[in-house]
Amino acid sequence: MRAREEVAAIPKGKAVVRHLEENAAFVPPIHKPERWWSPMNLAQLVCIRRLMFETKDEGEHIDLLKMGILGILIPVSNAKHNHVSLTYSKYPLPPVDVVGVLADKLGEMVEDINAVSSLPCSEVKVHAGNSKEAAAILSHGPKVSAVITSPPYPNRFSYARETRPHLFFFNMIESAEAVGQLETDALGGTWGKATSVLMEGVEPANAVIRRLLKPYIDGAHREGNGNLMTAYVVKYFNDLFAHAEQIGIVCRTRAKLAYVIGNSKFFGNPLPSDEILGAIFSHFGFKLDGIHKMRRRVSKSGLYEAVVMMSRK
């Protein structure tokens, strides 16, 4: 493997800092990359990144290779999943064999592919876009007969924040400002620029949302940062309402829906996200067939994940 040979040539000790300066053009343009990776591990990733940009190969195997690389960015970093969100370790991760870690990850992927290779396959088409604009994205296709998905939970977890290394490594995002906009546009976005939106206050989008949320947000402003959290809950379900409206447009008669969602707690009070989701979809002609609680979540007591089953007559 060429990566193995070139990584072996990276200078050790303090000289690796000079090496990174000389290869600055291939350092991921994320803010403070040295906070994410210790110098030697970053230098190895920079080598791999340069080789990927220089390759002229095309095809599915390149996409799989990129997926493998993205899959190791956090394991070889100073960030850990000791909490719901990423946090930085007190001490930087010592140098590791990044190419070896990548080889192991690619081996896992090959095993997974072989394990499912005998299963029936079907044609898949991917549409890029915001689920709150599904009608425009799917305007030329047939009506949808089933939706199986898991939207973000109303727990202030930020997918944009958690995947910044991945977004920047292969230039899937242009700048920190673009990450903030991505988060703001996302369903329930709460990090970065989205926080500024929340601080300005968010009102229920309509009478339906106002009625459904009234028992859970009344009086919340009296508790600490209640105004911010209330705005977050309202924005989340405003976004979910917009999404449900679009799903109502793109789905055919007798369509079936399955939404995996977790409930939440704010200021110690339960927020039954699954029940509220079902009520929102009922506004667009879907019948609640049942809510099946799957498992307890390892966080606050009383939290669980459920599948909300719905259908259209």
Image (spheres, helix red, strand yellow):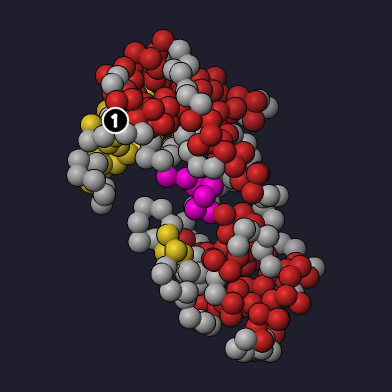
Q: Is residue 208 visible?
A: yes
From the top left corner, tell me how far across and down residue 290 is, in percent. 27, 28
149 vs 176, left or right, is left
Q: Is residue 68 visible?
A: no
176 vs 301, left or right, is right
Mark 1, secondary structure of its residue: loop
The answer to whether 66 is drawn above or below residue 4 in the figure is above
- On the rendered image, what quadrant is the C terminus found in? top left
The answer to whether 128 is drawn above or below residue 56 in the figure is above
The residue sitting at the left extreme is 301
The residue sitting at the top extreme is 207
The answer to whether 169 is drawn above or below residue 267 in the figure is below
177 vs 298, left or right, is right
Three-letter amino acid code at the position of disc 1: Glu
Residue for badge 1: 223
Q: Tag 1: Cα neighbours inside 10 Å, few (<14), some, or many (≥20)?
A: few
Which residue is rendered at x = 44% and y = 37% of the image? 151
Q: Quadrant of residue 215?
A: top left
The answer to whether 248 is drawn above or below residue 90 in the figure is above
Q: Nearer the viewer, residue 109 or 81?
A: 81
Q: Which residues are magenta?
A: 157-163
Which residue is rendered at x = 66% and y = 87% of the image? 15
From the top left corner, tell me how far across and down residue 132 is, in percent. 55, 28
Which residue is rendered at x = 53% and y = 34% of the image? 196
From the top left corner, tell me how far across and down residue 86 is, in percent. 43, 57
- On the rendered image, what quadrant is the N terminus found in? bottom right
Residue 162 is one of the magenta-drawn residues: yes
From the top left corner, tell me how far across and down residue 197 is, in percent. 53, 30
Which residue is rendered at x = 65% and y = 25% of the image? 136
Q: How many marks?
A: 1
